[in-house]
Image (tube, rainbow, N blue to C red):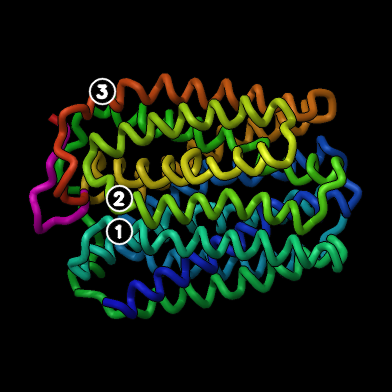
Amino acid sequence: MKAATGRLSFLYAALFFELGVNLPFFPLWLRAQSLSDEAIGIVLAAPLLARIVANPVVGALADRSGRARAALVICAVTVTVGTGLLAFAGGFLPILLLVIAIALAQGPLIALTDAVTLRSLKELQTPELRYGRIRLWGSAGFAIANLSVGWMLDWLPAASIIGMLLLSALVTALAAVAVAVVRVPERATTPMQPVGKLERPHLLVLAIAGASLVQASHAAVYGFSTLHWQSLGISGGAMGSLWAAGIVSEITFFSLLGYVVRGSAGAAALLAASAAIATLRWAGMAQDPQIGFLVLLQFTHGLTFGATHLSSVFLLARIAPAGMLAQAQAWLAASWAGIMAVLTTLAGYLYGEWGEHVYCLMAAVSAAGFLLLIPVALGFRGRTSLGLPLAGDAEQPVQRLG
C-alpha cells in the first residue's frame, strides 16, 4: 500500500512540477520568441480548446477499455516527445501547432491521474479521502518549480525554459510508467461496465458548469500575471515566490482540510464557498495592490483553486455512475479548459488596454459560477457528511441523489 501511494504521490509531484514551469513561465518564453500579446493569448488558449476534444475522448476510452494506466503512460510519453520538438520551433504558426499537439496528450493527464488514484485507493481498501494527502505532493511540486525556476531565470535566459519543461516532462513520463507497472487486483484490470443510473443529472451539469467557471476565472493570473509583474520591475525570484505563496496555501488546504470534507453536502458547500472567495480575489487583483496585499491575495489560491478542485472531484465521484469515473472528471477538465481558452484569448486582447483591470472580467465569471453552484449546495443540503462510498466501487452500494 505504501509503495503504491508513494508512486502516486511522486506522479502528482512530477506532473505538477511540469505545470509549475509551464503556467507561470511559458509566456516569458513566448515573449522571447518575439510574439505579441495577442499571439501569446492565442497560443495559450489554443491548447485549452484542444482539450475540449481530447479530455472526453481519452476519458471515455480509458473507462471502456479499463486501461487508464496505459492511457496515462501514452499521454505522458507523447508530451515528452512534443516538448522536445518545441525546442526547435520558431515563429507563431509552428509554435502554435506544436503546442496544440502537446495539449492533446497533456490535457487528459490530470483527469487520468485522478481516476487512477481514486480507483487505486479503493483497490487498496484505504479511505478515498487519502486523496488529499496524495494530491498535496502535486502542489508541493508546483511550488518547488515556481521557486527554483523563478530563481534560475534571474541568471539564465528565457530560452532555457524549454529545457526545464523537457526535463520535467521526462520525469513525469517515468513516474507514469512506475504507476502503470504496479500489480493490481484482477477485477481492476477488466473493462469497467456502467453501473447504476445517473439521477438528477441537472445537479451534475450545474456542478460541472459552476466549477468550470471558477477554475477558468484563473485565466488572467495564469496567462498574464507574470508578464504584468515583470513590467512592474518585480524580479524572477519574487515572481516565483508570489506563485509559491499560492501553492503553499493549497498544500495547507489539502493537508488540513482535504480529508475532513467527506460528504456530498460538505463538498457542495465548499465548492460554492470557493466561488465566492475567487470573486473577492479577482476584485482585489483588479486594484493592482502593493506587494504585501498581493501576497495575501495569492494565499487565497488554496481556496479558489484547491477547494474547487478537491470538492468537485469528490462531488463528481459521488454523482456519476460507476463506469463513468474517468469520463466525469474529463468532462469537468474539458469544460473549464474550453471556458479558460475563451477567457485567455480575451485577456490577450484586453490586457494591453485594460492592464490589471482585466481581473474585473475574471471576477464576473467566478460570480456567475457562484450563482450556478448555489442550487447544487442546496440540493445536497442535509446529506450526511461522513461515510459516503465512492462511485465506482462495485462491491458497495452507492448512495445516489434522491
Residue at horizontal 86 percent and vertical 68 percent from the top: 155
Mark pair 3, 2: CA separation:
24 Å
Q: What main secondary structure does the magenta stretch of the protein show?
A: loop
**Which residue is painted at 67% across and 31% down in the image?**
285
Residue beneath disc 1:
118
Residue located at (66% from left, 59% from top): 146
- Please give the label number shown on residue 56: none
Label 3: few (<14), some or many (≥20) within 10 Å? few
- The answer, for residue 290, to whether it is visible in the render is yes
> What's under tag 3, amino acid-wise?
Leu
| Classed neighbour count for the residue bearing mark 1: other residues with Cα under 10 Å, few (<14), some (14–19), many (≥20) | many
The answer to whether any part of residue 100 appears in the image is: no
Q: Residue at x 52, y 32 (%)?
A: 278
- Give the Cα separation between the discs numbered 3 and 1: 26 Å
Residue beneath disc 2: 325
Residue type at mark 1 is Leu
Q: Please tell me whether residue 394 belongs to the stretch shown in magenta.
A: yes
Q: Position of residue 367 (x, y in %)?
A: 50, 22
Sequence order check, earlier mark of 2 and 1: 1
Give the side of residue 6 with respect to residue 296, left or right: left
- Indicate left or right for 344 with 331 as reference: right
Mark 3 touching mark 2, by CB under 8 A? no
Residue nearest the viewer, comparing 69 with 151: 151
Q: Kindly state the secondary structure of the residue where label 1 is placed.
A: helix
Q: Secondary structure at mark 2?
A: helix
Q: Quadrant of residue 237?
A: bottom right
Residue 378 numbered mark, or none: 3
Q: Which residues are magenta?
A: 391-401
